[in-house]
Every structure is written in C-alpha cells, then in structure tokens.
Image: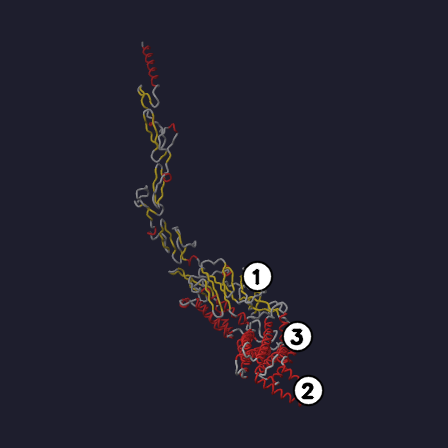
C-alpha cells in the first residue's frame, strides 16, 4: 500500500513539473504559479555601469543616467554601453570670461583660469549662475619680487622688473620666476665702466666715475675711454711757428683737458656742454685758418688735416642728434653718431659738398665698442686751389701733370685703427670739370711732410661727371685730372723764335711811325702808340724771360711784367672802342684827355696786378715757365679782366655800328667823315678779334691732344706785331706816303730841299684836315 502511495505522488510531481515549463518569457514559477521575473535584480547588473534598470511585466529596459549617452531605452540584447557626454565640447557651455570648462563623469564644472578667482569664493561653479572670474592682484604681496625689484600686475598674471642699475645674472631685467633675484650691474659686470672708470649705483642706475685722463663724454653710464691730450699739447707747441693754427689747436687741447678733468670739475663743465656749439666754434676757427692760406707750407696742411680728424672724433660723441649737418663759409660737414648697448649694424651713407662717403658700421666701430660709434665727412670749399701741387710722388706719363678735379674732403670714424681696414670704404666724387681720366688720391703726411699719394686707393668706376674711389684707409681725399704739357716742340720753338723778332721789329716801326709822323697825330694815334708799346714790352720780356725759371724771384717778376703789359694792351684796345663811340655819338669834345687815357690804360692793369700779387703771390711763376699758375686757377686773374674788357668793347662796337647805320640813312649824311669812322671801326674790330681769339686758343692748349691749339696760339702771338703794322701802317695811304717821302729823301739827297718844302706843305695841309676830320687814315 505504501508503494502505491509513493507511486502516485511521483506521478503528481511529474505532472506539476510539466505545467511550470509553460510560463511565458519574463516569468518564473513561484509556488506552482507563473509570476513576473525581476531582471533588474540580476548580478552583475543586466544594464551595465552608469545605467538604470527598469523592470516591466514580463520584461525590462535600461536607461543611461544623466550625463551619459544614449538617451533612449535599450536592453542587454542591444549590446549598448552608456558613454559619458563631454558637455564642454558637445554643448554650448559658457563659463564666462577668464574661466574654463572642465568635463567630469556624468557632468561638468567651471573653474577660473590661473591668476583669477570666482566671485562666490568657490573653486568650481556651473554656468548661468551669474558667477564671474576676477583678476587676482599678486602684487599685494610686497615680498613677491624680492628686493631691488618692483612688481607689476597684469590681467591674470604679474612680472617683476629689476630696479635701475640692477639685473639678473642672465642679463634680463624682467622676470616671473620667483627663484631669481636682481643684482647690481656693478657686481655682475666688473668691466662695465672700462679700465678708467669706477662703477657706483645711483637712483637712476649705475654711474661710471672716470679717473683723470679718461672720459665718457658726459654720458655717465658709458665706459670711460682714455684721451691722450699730451698728443694735442705737443701739436700745440709745434703749431706756434704758424699762428693761424694756434687758435684751432688751442680749442682742441682745451676741450680735451676739460673732458679728462677730475669728476667734480667735469660735472660742472658738462652742465653747459653743447656739442652743436662746440662744432660751430671749431668750424669758425677752421675758416680762419683756411682764409689765411698755406703759402706752400705742406707741413701746415698736414697739421690741419690731423687736427680736423681728431676734432671730428672728439665732437661726435658730444652731439645730441644722431645726424648733424653744418656749413660755414669754407667748409661743409655731416656727422653720424649711434648709441646703444651693442654695436650698430648695416651700412651708412654721408654726403657733403658733392661727395659721398659709404661704408658700414662694423668698419666704423672697429674691434673695441665704447658704447657709441661715429662717422664724419668734412668738405673744404676752395681748398683744391691751394693744394694744386705736391704731385711729385705720383707716377706720371711723359709731359703729364695733374690738377685737382674735385672737392677735398676729410673722412673719419670712431675706430682708432683705420690705417688698414678689413673692408674698404667708398667715396663718390663729383667732378669740377668734365673729364674721363681721373685718379683717386689721399694726402699722406709721411711723404716729406705731406704730398698726394695713390697708395691704398683705387678707382672703381668713372664717368665724365663723377668718380667712385675705394680706399683701405681713412684720411683726406680728392680726385685728380691729368693735364698734358705740349713740351718743347721744335716746330713751335722755331715759329716763336722767327715770328716774335719779326713782330718786335714791326711793333718798333709802328711806335716810331706813330710818334714821329705828325700828319697822323690824333687821339686814336695816341691809343695805337701805347698799344704797340705795351705789346712790344710784353713780347720782348716773353722772348728773353719766359723760360728763365732757375730764379724763383726773377721768374715771378717776369710773370708779373707779362701779366701787366698784356692787360695794358687790352685796356688800350678798350679805349679805342670808347673813342670810336664818342666820335659817332658825340658832336663836340670827341677826343679823350691824355691823362684819362694814361690812367685807364696803365692804371687799371696796375691795380689788377697789385691785388693779384697780394692775394696769391705764389701764383706768379711755375716750374716750367714764368707765367701765371694754371693749376690753382690763378690764370683767371688775367682771363677774367680780359673777358670783361672784350665784353665792354663788343658793346661799344655794337652801339657804334648802330649809330653809324642811323647816320648813313639820314637826309644829309657827312659821307666822307662817316666812311673814315666806318673804316676805323672795321680795323678796331679786326684787331680785337685777332688778339682776343689768340688768347682763346691759349686757354685751351693745356689738355691732352691739343697741339693744334698750341700751333694757332703760337702763330697768332708771333705775328701780332706784323698784323698791327699791316692794319695801322701799311694799309694807311698817309703813312705809305710818308714812308715814300722818307725813302725818297734818303735815295735822292740832291732833292732834299724840295722834299723838305713839299713835306712841310703836305704836313700843313694834312694837319688842317686832321683838325677837321680827326686826321685819321682810312683803308
């Protein structure tokens, strides 16, 4: 029975089990019934991390927490995991100015940037709460930068600046690293004031106190450099032989001594230092020296150039402006000065007096930088005329001489080692006269006291109007042009020695004729007489003394005599033009008084020669001939008055011709008198043309390839007397008649009585005509 019961119970359990397996999904059998299964209680969580499980009848769903994605429902079957949302990137979170957004798991928060704090005092906040980030003033802590430094607050930060005269070991003066501290520049750099200075701290920074013999030119933070005033003092003693140099050297010496005095005295002086006024005083003293001239003293020229170089170096650091230009009656100067902790870089260009000086600041500074660098170019006005010489150390071709064809300049820089520069400097000179043949030279005081030299200077390029020179040293420079002396050409010498004696004979005949023949005596005859006398003396002196150069004084006298009598001949020709003008224009008192003619004919040349000899006595006589010096422009003391006289003469001749034309066209012209005046005028113009053209050719015979000019000049000058004889004697019928009577009286002495009577009668007749018609002959 018991077995039957157990069998029944087993069958019942089997039936019950079969019924539970039929519960729908999401349910489970609980006490024989199907009930909802809560999947959210499973371990591990069925939805994973950062998700919330929500159970439903027979199922469930997962939902990501706030701040995670995705935002829709899902189940484990979907294989989805919740990921954090970066609100700082994917959403428009605005934390405000000077704040930044920081993402967190499931959210975000705002923090102020470094150097700012929030207005609510909390470190974090979220947007849209009205919280702002305010700048934190780090400088409220007085010890934040340490001693000898000041704190400067900036938005969100700060920095420290070392006080004047202090800096970091690295050399910087600004810092934010609080582990660094400011130290005195006197302790960091022991050489900051140079060998001749002592460094002290002051309220404005460090200050260099220079010892005696050293200077920093009034700039207290600049290195002290040595000034050797003993050199200037020795030059001052040497210049005592030349009073003109005394003022210039004294100015330089006194300025040097002031700069190198003790510190207490120097401070007093530098209260009144004015570099511009110092420069003006120097230029004024230099003008006085240039005005007095050098009288051929090359040692004086060398001393002047040396002083100018020293003074420009001395004045440069005292100037307040970086560029200074000044000019005076005799000079023009431009100075550049650069200040700074480090040497200047790049090129510079200075122009003064039609000359340019080009170099670079490295060359101007040199190997030692003193805290400044200077460069200067000084141009002399008219000095080229005084230095037209001293070419004996230049190599020349045969029959070649030189002439300065540019302004003379002095160039200097603060670099003390300029005898041999690593990089050459360039000068661009404008020519005074157009020429293609140019030579670059400098003044070398070592050549027997001073002379022009080409050493170290080369010509880079040249045109008709300018030349570019490159030099490996600094000094005083110029450009030369070549002149070519025609030399002793045999043909020219033959023409001179044949033509001049012939001219002298003809002039002597003219003088005798004008003086003795009474029938032609008149004002115009007197003018011709003195014209021939002037030409006769001039050509006679020329013939016997032009080449006597062995005696300098005698040669100068010969040149002066030639200067005087050639000018006198032009003055007498001018008087002839005046006389013809008076004969045509004036009706009465047409003659000139002899005393006035003598004063004009001989007095005016005397005044010109006296002034020329006073201004430049060395202009009379040269090494090759006894005439006026051509190279220094002294020849214009002759050509200038000659040009003026020719101009005046031409003016008178034009008026005379104009008046003659009016009288010829009048109703009752005096044809006989007018024809005579016309003939006189033609003769005078021809005479002026011959003599004037001769000297025009003479002016152009000192250049290369001008031998033809020399031939024309020599022929015209040699035959001047012959031409005078032909125009005023041979072509005059009255003079020819007198010559015939004179020759007749010599050849037929038995008829001398009759000839004498005839001559007297003729003389009376001619004398009567002379009173009426001025007694002039006609061609």
Task: Name the image colouring.
Answer: secondary structure
Identify the image quadrant of residue 171: bottom left
* Secondary structure beneath label 1: strand
Residue indicated by mark 3: 495
Q: Nearer the viewer, residue 367 or 316?
A: 316
Residue indicated by mark 1: 461
**x, y percentage for residue 125?**
32, 42
Count of numbered circles in the view: 3
Q: Nearer the viewer, residue 555 or 13?
A: 555
C-alpha distance separating marks 2 and 3: 34 Å
Whether residue 665 is visible to the viewer of this picture, yes or no, is: yes
Q: Quadrant of the C terminus?
A: bottom right
Q: Nearer the viewer, mark 2 or mark 3?
A: 2
Neighbor class of circle 1 (other Cα within 10 Å; few <14, some 14-19, many 20+) is: few
* Secondary structure beneath label 2: helix
Q: Earlier in the sequence, mark 1 or mark 3?
A: 1
Q: Earlier in the sequence, mark 2 or mark 3?
A: 3
Residue indicated by mark 2: 746
Name the residue at the top extreme: 1
Name the residue at the bottom extreme: 753
Q: Is residue 65 above or below residue 359?
A: above
Q: Is residue 60 above or below residue 192?
A: above
Q: Are marks 1 and 3 in contact (CB under 8 Å)?
A: no
């Amino acid at each position: 029975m018991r077995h039957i019961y157990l069998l029944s119970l087993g069958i019942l359990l089997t039936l019950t089990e079969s019924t539970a397996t039929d519960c729908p999904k999401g349910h489970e059998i609980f006490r024989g019934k199907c009930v909802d299964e809560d999947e959210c209680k499973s371990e591990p969580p069925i939805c994973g991390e950062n998700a919330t499980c929500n159970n439903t009848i027979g199922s469930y769903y997962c939902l990501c927490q706030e701040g995670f994605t995705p935002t829709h429902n899902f189940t484990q079957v979907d294989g989805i995991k919740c990921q954090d949302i970066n609100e700082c990137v994917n959403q428009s979170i605005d934390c405000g100015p000077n704040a930044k957004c920081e993402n967190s798991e499931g959210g975000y928060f705002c923090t102020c940037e470094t150097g700012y704090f929030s207005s609510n005092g909390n470190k974090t906040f979220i947007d849209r709460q009205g919280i702002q980030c305010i700048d934190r003033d780090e400088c409220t802590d007085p010890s934040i930068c340490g001693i000898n430094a000041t704190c400067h607050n900036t938005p969100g930060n700060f920095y420290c600046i070392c006080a004047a005269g202090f800096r970091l070991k690295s050399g910087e003066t600004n810092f934010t690293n609080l582990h660094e501290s400011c130290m005195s520049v006197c302790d960091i750099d022991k050489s900051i004031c140079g060998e001749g200075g002592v460094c002290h701290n002051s309220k404005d920074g460090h200050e260099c106190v220079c010892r005696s013999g050293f200077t920093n030119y009034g700039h207290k933070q600049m290195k002290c450099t040595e000034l050797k005033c003993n050199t200037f003092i020795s030059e001052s003693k040497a210049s005592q032989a030349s009073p003109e140099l005394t003022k210039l050297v004294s100015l330089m010496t006194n300025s040097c001594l002031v700069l190198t005095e003790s510190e207490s005295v120097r401070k007093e002086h530098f209260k009144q230092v004015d570099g511009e006024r110092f420069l003006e005083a120097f230029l004024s003293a230099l003008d006085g020296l240039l005005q007095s001239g050098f009288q051929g003293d090359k040692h004086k020229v060398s001393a002047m150039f040396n002083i100018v170089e020293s003074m420009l170096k001395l004045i440069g650091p005292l100037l307040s402006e970086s560029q200074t230009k000044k000019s005076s009656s005799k000079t023009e100067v431009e100075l550049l000065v650069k200040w700074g902790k480090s040497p200047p870089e790049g090129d510079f260009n200075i122009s003064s007096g039609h000359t340019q000086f080009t170099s670079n600041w490295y060359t101007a500074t040199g190997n030692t930088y003193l805290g400044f660098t200077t460069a200067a170019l000084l141009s002399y006005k008219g000095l080229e005329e005084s230095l037209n010489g001293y070419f004996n150390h230049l190599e020349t071709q045969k029959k070649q001489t030189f002439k300065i064809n540019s302004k003379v300049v002095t160039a200097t820089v603060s670099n003390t080692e300029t005898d041999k520069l690593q990089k050459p400097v360039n000068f661009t000179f404008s020519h005074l006269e157009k020429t293609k043949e140019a030579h670059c030279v400098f003044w070398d005081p070592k050549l027997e006291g001073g002379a022009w030299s080409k050493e170290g200077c080369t010509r880079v390029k040249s045109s008709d109007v300018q030349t570019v020179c490159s030099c490996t040293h600094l000094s005083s420079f110029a450009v030369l042009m070549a002149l070519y002396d025609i030399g002793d050409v045999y043909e020219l010498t033959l023409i001179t020695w044949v033509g001049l004696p012939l001219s002298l004979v003809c002039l002597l005949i003219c003088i005798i004729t004008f003086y003795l023949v009474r029938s032609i005596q008149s004002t115009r005859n007197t003018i011709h007489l003195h014209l021939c006398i002037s030409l006769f003396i001039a050509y006679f002196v020329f013939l016997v003394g032009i080449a006597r150069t062995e005696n300098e004084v005698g040669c100068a006298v010969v040149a002066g005599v030639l200067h005087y009598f050639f000018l006198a001949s032009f003055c007498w020709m001018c008087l002839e033009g005046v006389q013809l003008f008076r004969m045509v224009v004036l009706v009465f008192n047409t003659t000139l008084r002899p005393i006035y003619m003598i004063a004009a004919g001989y007095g005016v040349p005397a005044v010109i020669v006296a002034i020329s000899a006073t201004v430049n006595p060395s202009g009379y006589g040269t090494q090759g001939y006894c005439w006026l010096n051509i190279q220094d422009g002294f020849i214009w003391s002759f050509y200038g008055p000659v040009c003026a006289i020719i101009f005046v003469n031409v003016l008178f001749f034009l008026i005379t011709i104009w008046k003659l034309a009016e009288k010829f066209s009048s109703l009752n012209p005096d044809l006989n008198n007018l024809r005579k005046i016309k003939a006189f005028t033609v003769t005078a113009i021809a005479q002026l043309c011959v003599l004037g053209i001769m000297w025009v050719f003479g002016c152009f015979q000192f250049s290369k390839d001008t031998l033809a000019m020399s031939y024309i000049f020599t022929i015209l000058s040699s035959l001047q007397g012959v031409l005078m004889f032909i125009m005023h004697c041979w072509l005059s019928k009255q003079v020819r008649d007198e010559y015939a009577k004179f020759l007749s009286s010599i050849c037929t002495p038995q008829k001398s009585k009759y000839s004498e009577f005839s001559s007297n009668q003729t003389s009376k007749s001619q004398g009567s005509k002379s009173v009426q018609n001025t007694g002039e002959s006609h061609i």
